[in-house]
Image (spheres, rainbow, N blue to C red):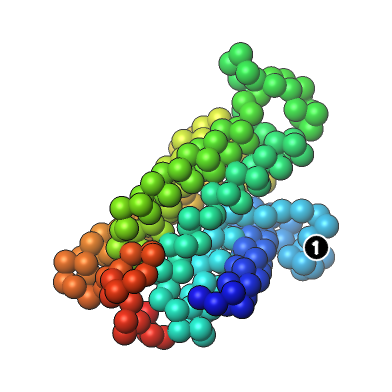
Amino acid sequence: MSAEQVNGFLMWAALGVMLGGRLGWWLIYHRAKLEPDAWYEFIAIWHGGMSFHGGLIGVSVATSVFAWRNNIPFWNLADGAALIAPVGLFFGRIANFINAELIGRPSDVPWAMVFPTDPGAVPRHPSQLYEALLEGLLLLVILWALKKVRPREGTIAACFLVLYGIFRFAIEYTREPDAELGFIAFRWLTMGQALSSAMVLTGVGLFLWVRRIGRQGISGGALDGGNDGHQGHGRNT
């Protein structure tokens, strides 16, 4: 990719995250959308509200379209995006912590803390920091270690989906359920866990597909490029 293409992709990715994240929040979490006078809420960004899973879908669509328009192998580009995504996740969760939003559940662990936004003023898990460490730092380390073995295209993206989904599912047990939805099933399952489960299944399916086409010799190449089968990739990749 040229420097111009990199800049262009960053713009497409940012738009995909913002539009997908906002639309995902509006469709999944915002119950006020059912009210006749709330039609404008999707564009009312001053009210806040973003969905990670919606942002993931948005950036995936943006990556697909950008790759097709610029004749770039999609999975190679997706792997590259997955390698840097944990950086944004880390700082995003740190921002959640600073803003005292998406607070944890009540807890008596030694590091529990009282958030200024909590009406009950009870000690809670700093779940934002758990997410920053697992979904951000640890995920970043694992994916970059995986890159060193030059895996087949799509493997890093698949591992991102699986590992993020597992980490998010586990951390949801320490995070206060969304006020708009609460528990959606079994008196313990949250919307975040349901969506993260779908991420894990998607990632596992992608990983198995990558291994299958690898055995068939259809696709090749690691993220670093070279002569690992990138020739012949076109708009149909």
Up-down relation of residue 198 to residue 172 (above or below): below
Quarter of image, res 75: bottom left
In the image, residue 234 above or below residue 195 = below
Rendering coords of residue 26 (x, y %): 67, 60
Give the residue at mark 1: 44
As drawn, 78 above or below 179: below
Residues packed near mark 1 inside 10 Å, few (<14), some (14 to 19) or many (20 plus):
few
> Percent from the top left, x then y, of residue 1?
50, 75
Residue at image position (39%, 65%) is 224
- Judge from the rendering whether residue 164 lies leftward or rightward of residue 30; answer left or right: left
- Find numbered disc 1 in the image and state the secondary structure of the residue it sits on: loop
Q: Position of residue 88 (x, y in %)?
A: 61, 51
On-image quarter of the C terminus: bottom left
Task: State whether residue 146 appears in this view.
Answer: yes
Residue at the location (51% across, 67% down)?
60
Residue 223 or residue 64, whichever sits in front: 223
Residue at 70 percent of width and 36 percent of height: 97
State the image quarter where residue 11 is shown.
bottom right
Name the residue at the front extreme: 226
> How many marks on residues?
1
Q: Position of residue 44 (x, y in %)?
A: 80, 63
Amino acid type, mark 1: Ala
- The one nearer the camera, 136 or 35, is 136
Q: Compared with residue 15, is residue 204 higher up or lower down, i.e. above or below?
A: above
Residue located at (65% from left, 45% from top): 91
Q: Nearer the viewer, residue 151 or 195?
A: 151
